[in-house]
Amino acid sequence: MSLRSPTVVRRRRFEALYVEHYAAICAYVVRRLRDSPAEVPDVVADVFAVTWRRLDAVPVGSEARLWLYGVARRTVADHERARRRRSRLLHRLRWESKARPSSAGQPGGSADGLIEAIERLPERCRQAYLLRWQHGLTRSEAAAALGISVKAVEAQMTRALKSLREALSEFL
């Protein structure tokens, strides 16, 4: 591979952006996620994953930092939405488990039942489900992360949700 090949040029441009802007983007994310410091590395990694995927859209020069801040803002917002969804789901599951009597030896529709059901999903379905609902990725982002088509992600999600409904109906 020559030093001028598109792959080498692309990688060098990404590396230059990363080195130049990592500290600023990391500081931005730290300020936005004060209540979730453990999530900062994942969110920053997501910002640079988007940057890699959309490298051709990144402006040249000083505009690049502004573009990265925009990606970071949207990524933090996506992270916060996913966190709120998980919190609402757990709250609802806790409420439902208190509202319904549980059978002896069975978790009464609690988060334990959901976790068990997720763990029993086939690997591909579980990956699609966790990327979409736990990590808050869009269908296209999940497809890119899994290296499959958007249609395949939709099919995996359909299977996962059907399987989870069936598994949880045993507990509810």
Image: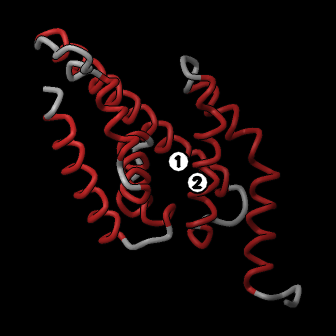
**Callout 1 crowding tier (Cα within 10 Å): few <14, some 14–19, many ≥20:** few
Between residue 82 and residue 104, name the one nearer to us.
Answer: 104
Q: CA distance from mark 1 to mark 2?
A: 5 Å
Cβ atoms under marks 1 and 2 closer than 8 Å: yes
Q: Quadrant of residue 148?
A: bottom left
Q: Position of residue 13 (x, y in %)?
A: 76, 68
Q: How many numbered marks have been drawn onto this rendered protein structure?
A: 2
- Kindly identify the residue that appears in the image at 21 percent across and 21 percent down: 92
Q: Position of residue 7 (x, y in %)?
A: 74, 81
**Amino acid type at mark 2:** Trp
Q: Quadrant of residue 86?
A: top left
Q: Write down the residue under mark 2.
A: 67
- Kindly identify the residue that appears in the image at 67 percent across and 50 percent down: 65
- Kindly identify the residue that appears in the image at 61 percent across and 40 percent down: 42
Q: Position of residue 47 (x, y in %)?
A: 59, 49
Q: Position of residue 30 (x, y in %)?
A: 64, 27
- Kindly identify the residue that appears in the image at 39 percent across and 63 percent down: 140
Tell me if residue 42 comes above or below residue 171 in the rendering: below
Residue found at the very far right of the displayed protein: 3
**Amino acid type at mark 1:** Gly
Q: Write down the residue under mark 1.
A: 70
